[in-house]
Amino acid sequence: MDARLLVEHIPSLRRYARALTGNAWAADDLVQDTLERACGKWRLWVVGTDLRAWLFTVMHNLFASQVRRRPPPHAVVPLEDVAPEQLQGGADPSLGLDLQRCLMQLPEEQRAVLLLVTLEDLSYAEVAKVLGIPIGTVMSRLSRARLRLQELMDGAAASSRPGLRRLK
């Protein structure tokens, strides 16, 4: 195996891992695990096929396994029930939620599709192959992810404006 083939894909793997995990340390661990797995399973990659897509598949499968192994959260609080000050961690209240925080509110399967299409510029067919789902599912998850992200961003912007209150 020629390590140079892998090295050129590390920046996009790091970018995708960071967006998936929302944490730089966890992202670096995921990239390292992905590269280790890729080296160990190198014989499974077919020369002439898209190495980048194969690496994203390896990463996605590792991340999905990690999510399944996590203990269930103790309590889930809807985003709408949390005061903006709590979400911002003491930041300037006029800033609202940032994109990263809104992305992390998306379900994992929607976030993965959205990131692969928008951040990594993969085609719907490539995303379907990476995630092992039909193209129609890619399209519907992408549509739902975009709508939900817009709702979260609009809600964040509205809740950060002084003098405005959300009606229940």
Image (cartoon, rainbow, N blue to C red):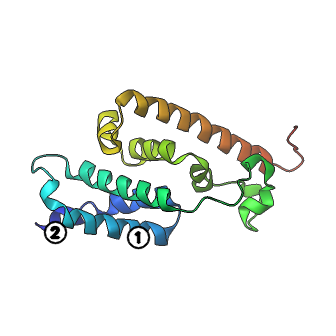
Residue 140 drawn at (x, y percent)? 47, 29
Residue at the image point whose x is 78% and y is 54% from the top: 82
- State if disc 1 and disc 2 touch (CB < 8 Å): no
Q: Quadrant of the N terminus?
A: bottom left
**Marks 2/1: CA distance?**
18 Å
Q: How many marks?
A: 2
Mark carried by residue 28: 1
Image quadrant in which you'd find residue 148: top right
The amino acid type, in three-letter code, at marker 1 is Asp
Q: Secondary structure at mark 2?
A: helix
Residue 39 drawn at (x, y percent)? 20, 66
Q: Quadrant of the C terminus?
A: top right
- Residue at the farthest top position: 136
Q: Secondary structure at mark 1?
A: helix
Task: Specify few, some or many for label 2: CA neighbours under 10 Å numbering under 14, 14-19, or 20 or more.
Answer: few
Residue at the image point whose x is 47% and y is 69% from the top: 26
Residue at numbered disc 2: 3
Say which label, 2 or 1, has the lower sequence index: 2
Residue 5 drawn at (x, y percent)? 16, 62
Q: Is residue 146 above or below residue 39?
A: above
Front in this rendered view, residue 26 or 6: 26
Residue at the image point whose x is 23% and y is 66% from the top: 7
Image quadrant in which you'd find residue 124: top left
Could you tell whether 25 is left or right of 55 in the image? right
Mark carried by residue 104: none
The amino acid type, in three-letter code, at marker 2 is Ala
